[in-house]
Image: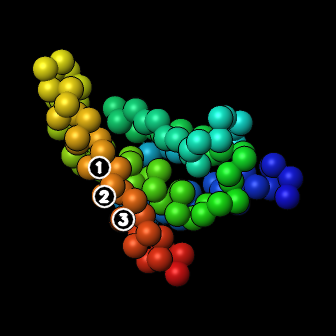
């Protein structure tokens, strides 16, 4: 499938998940990139500007795409609602171990939630 067509398909799926997670006020851009192959995708966001960027790994784009999209947008969703805890821990050097535990716990929770939310959205 040509990259333009693939990107359009991804963008439609992102919009669908975005609506379901009540993130319609965010401008989310999607790109297909070429990275080291370790991650399916990566999201970065700017809450004050209500924007986010998701870069999908070209080498792994066909592996669990629906779940990958849900997973990345759940990062945005959780950060939007409870990200202040992570921000506080990041600013305080003496709490680095707590920050690490928080991030690992968040990732585990998102992995579990992504599977459930994907089924609810995509069937």
Q: Quadrant of residue 115?
A: bottom left
Read off the residue under disc 1: 106
Q: Quadrant of residue 29?
A: top right
Q: Secondary structure at mark 1?
A: helix
Q: Secondary structure at mark 2?
A: helix
Residue at image x 19%, y 31%?
97
Picture coordinates of residue 53, whole percent (x, y): 53, 38
Q: Nearer the viewer, residue 6 or 33?
A: 33
Q: Against 4, is 119 above or below?
A: below
CB contact under 8 Å: marks 2 and 3: yes
Residue at image x 40%, y 32%?
46
Question: What label does residue 65 carry, if any?
Answer: none
Read off the residue under disc 3: 112
CB contact under 8 Å: marks 2 and 1: yes
- Give the crowd class for mark 2: few <14, some 14-19, many >=20 residues within 10 Å: few
Q: Name the N-terminal-most of marks 3 and 1.
A: 1
- Label 3 – label 1 distance at C-alpha: 10 Å
Read off the residue under disc 2: 109
For the question of whether residue 29 can be seen, the reply is no
């Amino acid at each position: 499938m040509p990259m333009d067509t693939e990107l359009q398909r991804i963008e439609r799926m992102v919009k669908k998940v975005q609506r379901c997670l009540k993130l319609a006020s965010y401008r989310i851009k999607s790109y297909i990139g070429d990275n080291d192959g370790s991650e399916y995708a990566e999201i970065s966001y700017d809450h004050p500007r209500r924007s986010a960027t998701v870069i999908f790994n070209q080498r792994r784009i066909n592996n669990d795409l629906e779940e990958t999209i849900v997973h990345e947008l759940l990062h945005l969703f959780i950060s939007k609602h409870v990200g202040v805890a992570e921000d506080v821990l990041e600013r305080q050097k003496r709490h680095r171990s707590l920050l690490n535990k928080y991030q690992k716990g968040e990732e585990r929770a998102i992995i579990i939630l992504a599977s459930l939310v994907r089924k609810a959205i995509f069937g």
